């Protein structure tokens, strides 16, 4: 089973197919919310950053090339840039949403609670799934996705080449997703 | 119950289905202001050049209508009840912050200078009441204060802020 291939194919198809983009979104939105929630510690900001990240992904979907890496890494690269911009400027960027004609979502307390719950559940699931990975993959995925290290840093820390570090992260993510999607299906 | 994830999905799918040509005409408001400012400045220059280059009393056949003086518009900010508190012994710090906020388009903040409970505050913090975090982030951004220094209102700040929803508690770092 190679979920990454499906994921990459979905993003390629999303260039012209709104339903494919929606499927790609549904596959990753919880992970992206959790990614931001872990870093900004505020559900409202996490939701705002998530919306801008997917608007930027929608805007730039034609620039994605599977040969350059997995779709998940591409998406989290966008998320990371949004986070850096937010930390530098002190406010969440709205450029992509404006370009895509998307309004700001007014979040009610109920919606924020739900975002919070999604983030908590996702973080707990990721922790459990991460623990089940082989040691080398777990260290690589944690370094890349949780701690935001670059591939060259991961390669140096694990005494492997940069392509090997990328492959380790990619395989780890694929295994994570396989585990988590199998948990979703009773 | 409306769900953020569902609402965002609807927005993304709608944006995907929208013809791309329409998106290109969406101009950010900042760019609109810059463009309008450039047009106004060009008009002023043209009027000035015409005025200086034609000293003769003969009237110009089609002189442009007199423009009112152009002033830089202040960015409209949300109407907020603001307070600025001085957490140091340096006089005038809170007033300076209040003036800066007013010049940026905020309503005149309530300047609290009678706080004797804490005059040794090191870091400037922007406090907010429930539901006003985004407003507080906006204020912090205007003052070039990082989001790590935006926090929910504590009892001490609330007591002094007198019903303000966002309170800037100025610390010694502001004086540097």
Image (cartoon, coloured by chain):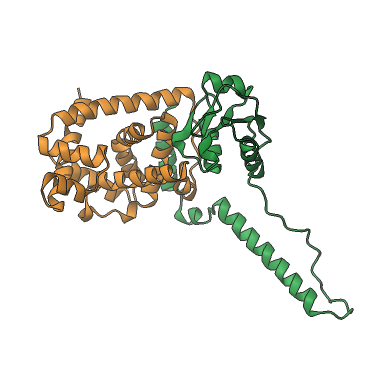
Chain colours: A orange, B green
**Residue A24 spot, x, y in % from top left:** 30, 41
In the image: residue A100, left or right of residue A173? right
- On screen, B93 above or below B161? below
Instruction: Please identify the quarter of the rendering in which residue B32 is found.
Output: bottom right
User: Could you tell me how many numbered marks the image carries?
Assistant: 0
Q: Residue at x 46, y 52 (%)?
A: B19
In the image: residue B155, left or right of residue B111? left
Q: Name the quadrant of the N terminus of chain B.
A: top left
- On screen, A45 above or below A64? above
Taking depth in this image into account, of A185 and A86 the one nearest to the observer is A86
Q: Is residue A182 visible?
A: no
Q: Residue at x 32, y 35 (%)?
A: A35
Q: Is residue A111 visible?
A: yes
Q: Residue at x 60, y 35 (%)?
A: B90
List the single residue furthest toward the right: B57
Q: Residue at x 17, y 43 (%)?
A: A169
**Residue A10 spot, x, y in % from top left:** 26, 45
- On screen, B168 above or below B40? above
- On screen, A23 above or below B27? above
Taking depth in this image into account, of B105 and A178 the one nearest to the observer is B105
Taking depth in this image into account, of B95 and A21 the one nearest to the observer is B95
In the image: residue A120, left or right of residue A5? right
**Residue A128 spot, x, y in % from top left:** 19, 26
**Residue A58 spot, x, y in % from top left:** 38, 48
């Amino acid at each position: 089973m190679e979920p990454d291939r499906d994921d990459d194919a979905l993003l390629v198809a999303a260039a012209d197919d709104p339903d494919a983009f929606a499927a790609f979104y549904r596959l990753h939105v919880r992970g992206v919310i959790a990614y931001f929630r872990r870093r900004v510690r505020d559900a409202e900001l996490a939701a705002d950053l998530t919306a801008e990240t997917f608007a930027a992904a929608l805007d730039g979907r034609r620039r994605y090339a599977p040969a350059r890496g997995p779709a998940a890494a591409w998406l989290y690269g966008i998320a990371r840039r949004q986070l850096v911009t937010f930390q530098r400027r002190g406010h969440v960027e709205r450029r992509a949403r404006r370009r895509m004609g998307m309004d700001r979502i007014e979040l009610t307390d109920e919606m924020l609670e739900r975002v919070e719950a999604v983030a908590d559940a996702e973080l707990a699931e990721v922790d459990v799934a991460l623990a089940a990975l082989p040691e080398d993959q777990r260290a690589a995925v944690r370094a890349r996705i949780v701690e935001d290290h670059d591939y060259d840093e991961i390669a140096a820390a694990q005494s492997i080449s940069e392509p090997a570090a990328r492959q380790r992260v990619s395989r780890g993510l694929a295994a994570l997703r396989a585990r988590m999607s199998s948990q979703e299906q009773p | 119950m409306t769900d953020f994830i569902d609402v965002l999905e609807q927005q993304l799918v709608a944006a995907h289905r929208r013809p791309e040509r329409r998106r290109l005409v969406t101009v950010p408001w900042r760019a609109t202001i810059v463009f309008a400012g450039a047009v106004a400045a060009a008009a002023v220059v043209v009027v000035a050049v015409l005025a200086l280059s034609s000293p003769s009393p003969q009237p110009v056949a089609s002189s442009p209508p007199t423009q009112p003086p152009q002033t830089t518009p202040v960015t409209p900010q949300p109407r907020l009840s603001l307070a600025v508190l001085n957490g140091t012994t340096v006089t005038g710090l809170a007033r300076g912050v209040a003036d800066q906020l007013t010049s940026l388009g905020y309503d005149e903040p309530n300047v609290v200078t009678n706080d004797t409970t804490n005059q040794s505050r090191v870091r400037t913090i922007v406090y907010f009441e429930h539901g006003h975090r985004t407003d507080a982030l906006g204020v912090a951004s205007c003052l070039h204060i990082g989001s790590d220094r935006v926090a929910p209102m504590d009892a001490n700040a609330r007591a002094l802020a007198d019903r303000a929803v966002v309170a800037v508690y100025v610390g010694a770092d502001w004086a540097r």
